[in-house]
Image: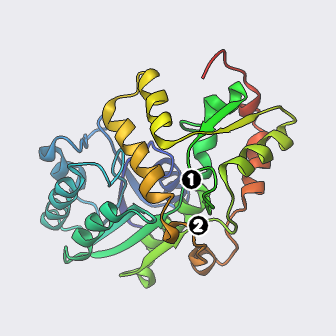
């Protein structure tokens, strides 16, 4: 049965992929964003109702992260608006190992709506579609927590799991933890990318404090500096975040995408060989 589904953050890394899969499967998709019609703006609760009207389910991504101040209040307002609009299900994208995000999860769990929580590890696409792209292009990557073992997960896997959660009732009430099939350090990732692209890319380990200063020097707003410092210190340093999950295989019936598969696929696009003058 085809559904009416709102994709909040439908132009983001996972949201755009979720929306595309849903459309391909024939579902009616409404993109939730400030520039859409009707508009959805997290900072304007009065916009929630019109975006939710007529929808059966919603995929929820909170920008920039569920850990930031104000997220719990926004998720609370959204769940109330969803119930008022007659929505049946919420699928919330959350962060693996994030205690603050878990507070937002509890709001959804207690909402009285059907729900699925999708807890994701760090995205592979941070290296090709986000803040680590330019350092890789410039051939110099500096990051803290160099020894952390991370089961990086592919955004395509997250999207496919989310679509199953949105369209199939068997996952209702579940917390699905999505990770890749192996654990890698940042240094290993950079070395893998350098090998596949046949480039010299240097990796430098820095402290969380030094990384924060680098971000400030680059003009990154203070709230983002705080968020990245939190994610590096509290999330990557959390032993729970370094565990591999097999929920992707349970839901999709196949193994999670390996980082090597992601690298080879992304290298074919040439994105990592586009040089920049500075990071």
Residue located beneath label 2 in the image: 179
Disc 2 element: loop
Q: Is residue 5 visible?
A: yes
Residue located beneath label 1 in the image: 123
Farthest residue, direction bottom = 170
User: Dot 1: few (<14), some (14–19), or many (≥20) neighbours within 10 Å?
Assistant: many
* Left-right relation of 167 to 246: left
User: Dot 2: few (<14), some (14–19), or many (≥20) neighbours within 10 Å?
Assistant: many
Q: Quadrant of the N terminus?
A: bottom left
Find residue 158 and name its label: none
Q: Is residue 244 above or below residue 33?
A: below
| Residue at image location 20% in from the left, 49% down from the top | 70
| Residue at image location 17% in from the left, 44% down from the top | 47
Disc 1 element: loop
Q: Is residue 254 above or below residue 30?
A: below
* Left-right relation of 267 to 279: right
Q: Is residue 10 visible?
A: no
Q: Is residue 205 above or below residue 30?
A: above
**Residue 203, horizontal then vertical, whole percent:** 70, 38
The answer to which of 169 and 122 lies nearer the viewer is 122
| Residue at image location 67% in from the left, 64% down from the top | 183
Q: How many marks?
A: 2
The answer to which of 93 and 80 lies nearer the viewer is 93
The answer to which of 155 and 221 lies nearer the viewer is 221
| Residue at image location 67% in from the left, 19% down from the top | 276
Farthest residue, direction top = 277
Q: Quadrant of the C terminus?
A: top right
**Residue 54, horizontal then vertical, whole percent:** 24, 59
Real-space Cα distance between discs 1 and 2?
A: 9 Å
Q: Work out whether mark 1 precedes mark 2 in sequence or the reverse, and give the earlier one.
A: 1
* Left-right relation of 41 to 202: left
**Residue 135, horizontal then vertical, whole percent:** 64, 30
């Amino acid at each position: 049965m085809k559904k009416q589904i709102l994709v909040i953050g439908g132009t983001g890394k996972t949201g755009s992929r979720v929306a595309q899969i849903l459309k391909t499967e024939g579902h009616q998709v409404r993109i939730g964003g400030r520039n859409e019609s009707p508009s959805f703006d997290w900072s304007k609760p009065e916009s929630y109702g019109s975006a939710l009207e007529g929808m059966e389910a919603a995929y929820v991504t909170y920008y920039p992260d569920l850990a930031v101040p104000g997220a719990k209040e926004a998720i609370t307002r959204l769940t109330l608006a969803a119930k008022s609009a007659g929505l049946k299900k919420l699928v919330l994208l959350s962060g693996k190992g994030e205690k603050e995000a878990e507070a937002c999860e509890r709001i959804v769990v207690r909402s009285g709506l059907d729900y699925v929580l999708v807890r994701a590890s760090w995205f592979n696409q941070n290296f090709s579609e986000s803040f680590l792209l330019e350092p890789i292009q410039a051939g110099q990557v500096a990051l803290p927590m160099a020894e952390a073992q991370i089961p990086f997960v592919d955004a395509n896997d997250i999207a496919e799991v989310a679509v199953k959660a949105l369209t199939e009732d068997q996952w209702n009430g579940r917390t699905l933890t999505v990770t890749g099939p192996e654990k890698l350090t940042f240094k290993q990732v950079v070395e893998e990318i350098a090998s596949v692209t046949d480039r010299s890319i240097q990796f430098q380990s820095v402290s969380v404090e030094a990384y924060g200063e680098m971000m400030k020097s680059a003009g990154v707003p203070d709230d983002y500096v705080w968020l990245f410092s939190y994610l590096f210190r509290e999330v990557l340093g959390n032993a729970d975040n370094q565990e591999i999950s097999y929920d992707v295989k349970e839901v999709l019936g196949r193994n999670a995408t390996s980082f090597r598969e992601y690298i080879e696929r992304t290298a074919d696009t040439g994105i990592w060989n586009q040089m920049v003058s500075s990071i």
